């Protein structure tokens, strides 16, 4: 992970020598729907790479083409230097896969399913260890159909780790997990990176991408709109900082936009008004002066740096999750 | 290779556990056929069951011949149906009796003469008709009748024998209803086992297990072999249990070769498992798979001659039966298990089942989707 932080700016942040995933000009159509519309990116060894995007953006399609489960119409996909389309058999022993929907034998126990998957590989980690790592020890004798949604999700991740893979693909791994389980999965993913593994994950959670990913790609309508570290993305889109306050009924937007330093403004669903400004002091002074005239003052006034969420909204015009 | 075998074994065990834990399927494939055998076997074999039914033709009509019929050696072993020789031979051809005994004219007077100290000119022939195709049954009946005759002769100790068994053969047209039914029910059970196999497959496609397996190094042939291995193992267990139950309750013994029977069970299981794969290839959801299976199984069952002889069906139905795979499996199993008159020669049955299996595998290899 260390090697990546230094290289700022631009899409070509990955040294071709260390890149373990290479996607070039990939397209995939389903009838009239273009699920993936000519994307290219690279992921370096030891990196946690996140694909971020709203429903239907093409994240799952992209990941499953890399896993050798779907065939692209155009373009090339290489994983660990192996052609993921033509030589997927050579790849399978070396990758770990957790599909978006946990797919488990309903009438087998946790133990049995992990043991079964372990038997598919030449080398595998001890099933007990994988089960313990995902905190499923207490449920090891339960049939998988009796597991809770989050437990199924964890078992699905456990199966992705059973062959000690070099690259782990996790499609929305934390969906349905409680906050504690999510935290512990984040820790696990970081430990996997620590061992020199590469992780490609998709997510809807901004917080997860900010916390976990060395780099993210924001996808929408099958295209990659933006790619880089979270910091890069934020500073690329916002030179300003954000002044936020509870929306005041009597103040027109025009007046706010005319305040010193304000570049843009936006009303959040939560009742906040956001002012993106290059001059925080001037903006706040102007705002207070404006409200004083009305005999009012702004509630919950504050300053923050724009987040990945702001970038996302800027790019897709959509909020991912409410 | 060793590695592949281990995978095959682990997957087969996993499949078997999945199967055994699915109560409904276990009922339909294992318990239901047994219930069928017990129920129908009891109905068709009549009250008491057990005793073999034979035709008894008394050309003598004296108290002495009546004595023989009533002797424990005869009456204790058989249920006697009496009538004229023509009637009885017809009854045997129709499968209503398993053998016919003809007591000769002059038997009574010969015995009376011998008892009075007169030496008989020559022993009288008591004719015994048995069906050579039902080897074991014929041998058993011959043994019992022979013993009864020897016993009768011995009762007049010191004197020359009065009676001698004259064994004759008669190809019977049929076998008892229960004997007819048991191989049919085994065939039905194998069909159920195979067809119901479609449901867990579609279930595994629907909940993406097949897709998930595609992301592992597991080969498809290993997956298919494990699936087949589990079904074939269950088929053999099923056949064993059915045969034992039919033997204990209804005295039905396997007349042909056990090896051939095992082969037919295997072949039948393969035919219907592959038909199950065809269903799984075209059924989009688990629900539609179970609907297709239940819609298919009844016509396959009732138009196949496993319950009723095909000859007894109207002409158009016979034509349909000729196209039904279960007809051939039932016929083959019947020939090996209980004998009787075949619908088709055994090699033809085997060829038809083999060809269907190849076609079904071919169709499913072409149309089966893993995701
Ligand atoms: N097998 C398929 N057949 C037809 N259309 C498909 C198929 N798979 C994906 N699509 C379409 O391709 C587009 C991208 O789907 P994809 O599943 O890759 O999105 P996603 O980013 O993973 O979305 P989500 O966040 O909802 O999981 C969608 O419009 C979807 O309807
Ligand atoms: Mg998805």
Image (cartoon, rainbow, N blue to C red):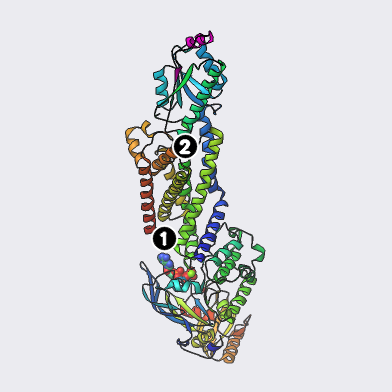
Q: Nearer the viewer, residue A89 or A59?
A: A89
Give the number of the mark in front: 2 or 1.
2
Q: Position of residue B65 (x, y in %)?
A: 50, 14
Instruction: Give the labeled residue for mark 1.
Output: B369
Residue under the point 45% across and 55% down: B285
Q: Magenta stretch containing residue B114, yes or no?
A: yes
Residue under the point 40% across and 70% down: A71
Marks 2 and 1, how far apart at CA:
44 Å
Q: Position of residue B111 (x, y in %)?
A: 50, 12
Q: Are marks 2 and 1 on the same chain?
A: yes
Instruction: Give the labeled residue for mark 2.
Output: B255
Residue A57: tell me if it is visible.
no
Q: Position of residue A73 (x, y in %)?
A: 36, 72
Mark 2, Cα crowd under 10 Å, few <14 / some 14-19 / many 20+, is some
Q: Quarter-wise, where is residue B76 in the image?
A: top right
Q: Looking at this rendering, what residue extends furthest in the right direction?
A: A138
Q: Nearer the viewer, residue B248 or B357?
A: B248
Question: At numbered mark 2, what does the secondary structure look like: helix, strand or loop?
Answer: loop
Q: Which residues are magenta?
A: B108-127
Mark 1, Cα crowd under 10 Å, few <14 / some 14-19 / many 20+, is some
B282 vs A235, left or right, is left
Callout 2: chain: B
Callout 1: chain: B
**Quadrant location of the C terminus of chain B?**
bottom left
């Amino acid at each position: 992970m260390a090697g990546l932080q230094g290289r700022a700016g631009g899409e070509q942040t990955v040294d071709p020598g260390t890149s373990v995933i290479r996607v070039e000009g990939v397209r995939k159509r389903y009838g009239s729907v273009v699920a993936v519309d000519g994307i290219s990116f690279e992921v370096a060894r030891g990196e946690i790479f996140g694909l971020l995007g709203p429903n239907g953006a093409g994240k799952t399609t992209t990941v499953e083409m890399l896993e050798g489960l779907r065939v692209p119409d155009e373009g090339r996909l290489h994983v660990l230097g192996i052609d993921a389309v033509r030589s997927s058999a050579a790849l399978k022993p070396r990758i770990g896969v957790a599909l978006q929907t946990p797919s488990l034998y309903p009438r087998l126990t946790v133990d049995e399913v992990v043991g079964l998957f372990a038997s598919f590989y030449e080398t595998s980690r001890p099933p007990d260890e994988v089960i313990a790592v995902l905190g499923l020890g207490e449920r090891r004798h339960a049939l998988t159909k009796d597991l809770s949604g989050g437990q199924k999700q964890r078992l699905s991740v456990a199966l992705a780790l059973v062959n000690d893979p070099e690259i782990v693909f996790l499609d929305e791994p934390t969906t349905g997990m409680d906050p504690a389980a999510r935290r512990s999965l984040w820790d696990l993913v970081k430990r996997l990176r620590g061992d020199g593994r590469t992780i490609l994950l998709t997510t809807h959670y901004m917080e997860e991408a900010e916390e976990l990913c060395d780099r993210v790609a924001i996808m929408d309508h099958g295209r990659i709109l933006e790619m880089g570290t979270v910091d890069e993305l934020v500073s690329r889109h916002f030179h300003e900082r954000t002044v936020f306050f509870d929306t005041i009924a009597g103040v027109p937007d025009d007046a706010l936009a005319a305040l010193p330093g304000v570049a843009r403004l936006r009303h959040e669903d939560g009742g906040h008004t956001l002012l993106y400004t290059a001059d925080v002091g001037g903006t706040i002074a102007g705002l207070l002066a404006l409200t004083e005239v009305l005999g009012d003052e702004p509630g919950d006034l504050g300053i923050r740096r724009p987040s990945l969420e702001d970038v996302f909204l800027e790019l897709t015009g959509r909020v991912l999750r409410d | 290779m060793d590695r592949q075998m281990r995978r095959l074994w682990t997957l087969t065990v996993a499949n078997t556990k999945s199967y055994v834990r699915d109560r409904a399927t276990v009922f339909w494939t294992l318990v239901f056929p047994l219930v069928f055998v017990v129920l129908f076997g009891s109905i068709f074999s009549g009250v008491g069951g057990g005793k073999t039914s034979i035709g008894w033709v008394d050309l003598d009509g004296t108290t002495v011949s009546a004595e023989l019929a009533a002797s424990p050696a005869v009456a204790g072993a058989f249920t006697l149906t009496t009538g004229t020789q023509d009637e009885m031979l017809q009854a045997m051809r129709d499968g209503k009796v398993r053998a016919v005994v003809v007591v000769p004219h002059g038997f009574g007077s010969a015995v009376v003469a011998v008892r009075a100290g007169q030496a008989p000119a020559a022993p009288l022939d008591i004719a015994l008709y048995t069906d050579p195709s039902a080897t074991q049954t014929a041998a058993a009946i011959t043994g019992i009748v022979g013993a009864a005759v020897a016993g009768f002769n011995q009762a007049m100790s010191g004197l020359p024998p009065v009676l001698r068994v004259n064994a004759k053969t008669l190809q019977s047209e049929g076998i008892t209803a229960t004997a007819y039914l048991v191989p049919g029910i085994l065939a039905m059970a194998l069909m159920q086992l195979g067809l119901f196999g479609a449901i867990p497959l579609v279930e595994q496609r629907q909940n993406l297990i097949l897709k998930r397996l595609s992301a592992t190094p597991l080969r498809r042939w290993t997956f298919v072999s494990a699936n087949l291995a589990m079904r074939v193992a269950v088929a053999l267990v099923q056949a064993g249990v059915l045969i034992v139950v039919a033997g204990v309750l209804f005295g039905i013994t396997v007349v042909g070769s056990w090896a051939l029977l095992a082969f037919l069970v295997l072949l039948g299981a393969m035919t219907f498992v592959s038909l199950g794969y065809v269903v799984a290839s075209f059924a989009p959801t688990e629900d539609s798979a179970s609907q297709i299976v239940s819609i298919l199984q009844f016509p396959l069952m009732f138009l196949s001659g496993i319950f009723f002889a095909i000859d007894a069906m109207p002409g158009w139905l016979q034509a349909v039966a000729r196209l039904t795979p279960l007809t051939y499996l039932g016929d083959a199993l019947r020939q090996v298990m209980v004998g009787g008159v075949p619908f088709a020669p055994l090699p033809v049955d085997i060829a038809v089942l083999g060809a269907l299996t190849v076609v079904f595998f071919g169709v499913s290899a072409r149309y089966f989707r893993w995701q």
